[in-house]
């Protein structure tokens, strides 16, 4: 290919890239707004109230009865790595940290609910502390008690 064709092709390619960049950076029609943390709060299905400006009103305070799904999520994210899905200490890191079998009847007889709350909140030995709301901690204690071996 002659040298002048290569130069012309190079200029054409550079022009195409510049034009694509200019038109690709167009801000659009302006009807797309930026997401805010409030956009992630689902509406309250019972009330359907909206605040000024069409935004969804903030969620009401949590009730004393915590959603079981939230308790399970807290278990999976914070506890199952060591204690396993059912609390037997058979999670992926359980043997390494010597996680106790929380389903063991003898263990459950020795440990009071208040002690479990304290350990979840402040940690103990190799277990780290967890900054969880009190209703979630109470739900985790109930979950542990419900898994007691028979």
Image (cartoon, rainbow, N blue to C red):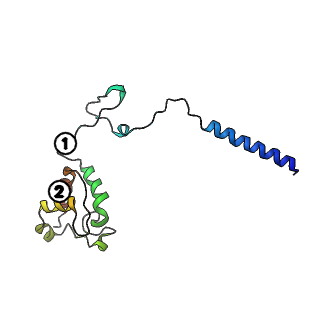
**Residue nearest the observer in this picture, 21 or 91:** 21
Name the mark nearer the viewer: 2 or 1.
1
Q: Earlier in the sequence, mark 2 or mark 1?
A: 1
> Which disc is residue 63 wearing?
1
- Residue bearing the label numbered 2: 142
- Where in the figure is residue 54, as x and y percent of width and height? 36, 27
Question: Residue 148 appears in which quarter of the rendering?
Answer: bottom left
| 22 displayed left or right of 131 | right
Question: Residue 141 appears in which quarter of the rendering?
Answer: bottom left
Instruction: Answer whether residue 63 is visible to the viewer in this image.
Output: yes
Q: Is residue 85 above or below residue 138?
A: below
Please give the name of the residue rendered at 83% of the width and 49% of the height, measured from the top-left corner. 6
Question: Residue 146 appears in which quarter of the rendering?
Answer: bottom left
What kind of element bears circle 2?
helix
| 81 displayed left or right of 5 | left
Proximity of marks 2 and 1: CB atoms separated by less than 8 Å: no
How far is disc 2 from disc 1 in space, using C-alphas? Answer: 17 Å
How many circles with numbers are drawn on the protein? Answer: 2
- Other-residue count near label 1 (Cα within 10 Å), few / some / many at <14 / 14–19 / ≥20: few
- Where in the figure is residue 79, as x and y percent of width and height? 27, 61
- Where in the figure is residue 29, as x and y percent of width and height? 54, 29
- Other-residue count near label 2 (Cα within 10 Å), few / some / many at <14 / 14–19 / ≥20: few
Instruction: Answer whether residue 145 is visible to the viewer in this image.
Output: no
Please give the name of the residue rendered at 29% of the width and 66% of the height, measured from the top-left corner. 82
> Which disc is residue 132 wearing?
none
Q: Is residue 89 above or below residue 1?
A: below
What kind of element bears circle 1?
loop
- The furthest residue to the top: 52
- Where in the figure is residue 47, as x and y percent of width and height? 26, 30
Quadrant the C terminus occupies = bottom left
């Amino acid at each position: 290919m002659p040298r002048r064709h290569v130069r012309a092709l190079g200029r054409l390619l550079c022009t195409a890239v510049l034009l694509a960049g200019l038109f690709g950076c167009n801000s659009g029609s302006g009807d797309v707004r930026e997401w805010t943390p409030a956009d992630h709060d689902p509406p309250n299905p019972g009330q359907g109230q909206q605040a000024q400006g069409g935004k969804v009103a903030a969620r009401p305070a949590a009730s004393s009865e915590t959603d079981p799904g939230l308790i399970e999520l807290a278990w999976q994210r914070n506890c199952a790595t060591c204690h396993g899905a059912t609390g037997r200490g058979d999670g992926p890191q359980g043997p390494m940290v010597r996680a106790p079998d929380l389903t063991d009847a003898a263990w459950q007889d020795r440990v009071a609910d208040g002690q479990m709350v304290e350990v979840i909140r402040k940690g103990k030995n190799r277990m780290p502390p967890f900054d969880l709301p009190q209703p979630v901690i109470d739900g985790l204690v109930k979950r542990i008690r419900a898994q007691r071996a028979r």
